[in-house]
Amino acid sequence: MTIEYRQFTEAERRRFWTSLDRGFGGHYEPSEAQYRLDREGFTPEMSMAAFDGEEVVGTSGAIGFESAVPGGAIIKNAGVTAVTVATTHRRRGILTNMMERLLRQEREKGQPVASLWASESAIYGRFGYGMSIQHENFKIDTRKAVIKNSPEIPGKTRYVSPDEARKVFPEAWEAAVNSHSGIPRKDELSWDRWALGLGGGGDWGKPWLVVYEEDGRALGYAQYLVKELHVFGEQTHGLLNADMVVHSNPASHAALWNHLLNVDLYDTLSTWRSPVDDSLPWMLEDQRQLERKPYDGVWYRMLDVAEALSARTYMAEGSLVFEVEDSYIPEWGGRFELTGGPDGSTCVPTTKAADITLPTASLSTIYLGGAKLAELERAGRVEEHTDGSVALADSMFAAERAPWCPLMF
């Protein structure tokens, strides 16, 4: 078997998407509008595929994102997506070969980092990815959950139609991008794709859309679905799924959660993609009414260590030499000297003795400030050579807010 790895051509687009959808258990049967958005939003240049003859047996690609890092700088970020291998071609090294080519392709485009949501969390560590953004699932009994504490809410929350949401939600999203590390910007095509998917269907029906505004500016929004659960002649108990709660300041967060917890007739509320430092538990009178389940959200991968570390600022002043071991693409590793603080940073290759040795996956894990290096050291994923260097790294890499990424890609 000879596998060819390359970008698909326009003539091969449907075969690529059919293989991709099959990998996730679906059939590619797009409407004319959906196919147009697929064609415009995912070009052949973004892809890396595996071919067995004319058959597409592996798919992958990367979206050219921009997202914030600690300190507020917006950096390029290769959003890896559409990763599948045909069941007929499993365990033949296709994913390993395809992923390397995709990462090299994205580095050549000037992307310092890559990121992805992992369908299976055990896969990507061997390719140098580290779990960088953790999220939580919430489940709340709204009959018992009462908000006791709240910041001042100077704005208002109101329902909007899908057409109006398409106009005002992008402003709220951009406000969230500028308030949190890790959230990618969304272009017009992404919003068109989102709007096209609002048709709903099945038991859940169409989503409800609400926006929070202050002085005419959209600063947050919620998108949620409801479903009734009842037995004839008995009391109705419904479910509310808060599919998306996007906020950019304490007031927008509090206003949206006040709305969601007070929707009548739906007694169980669930949501996911909440940041791990969400303040909702501290707003409730009884935290026991909130069930929290942490899970891995977004995985990051260093493509250019020096550029990535230079892009962010650091909470404390300091200088450290890292020996970065990259077992997947060894030439991307090496020894790097980081000097930085709140006002800026530099990171350059060096021959100085290393203070800390760690794999690229561990460096990726702490990059946005979502994990402590000391925890990774206790897990055997970091080696300290200079006393106090791990503590210094944790002081430097700390962030005011946990990273967050409510966008699935």
Image (spheres, rainbow, N blue to C red):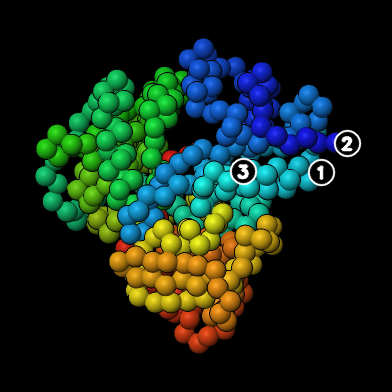
Number of residues whose C-alpha sits closer than 10 Å to that of mark 3, classed few (under 14), some (14–19) or many (20 or more) = some
Which residue position is annotated with label 3? Answer: 105
Q: Secondary structure at mark 2?
A: loop
Which residue position is annotated with label 2? Answer: 1
Mark nearest the camera among 2 and 1 is: 2
Residue 78 vs residue 176, the one in the foreground:
78
How much space separates mark 2 and mark 1, taking CA atoms?
10 Å
**Image-quadrant location for residue 383:** bottom right
Residue 142 vs residue 88, the one in the foreground:
88
Number of residues whose C-alpha sits closer than 10 Å to that of mark 2, classed few (under 14), some (14–19) or many (20 or more) = few
**Image-quadrant location for residue 223:** top left
Number of residues whose C-alpha sits closer than 10 Å to that of mark 1, classed few (under 14), some (14–19) or many (20 or more) = few
Residue located 41% across and 58% down the image = 311
How much space separates mark 3 and mark 2, taking CA atoms?
24 Å
The tag earlier along the polypeptide, 2 or 1, is 2
Residue 264 shown left or right of residue 299 in the figure: left
Residue 405 shown left or right of residue 19 in the figure: left
Residue located 17% across and 53% down the image = 151
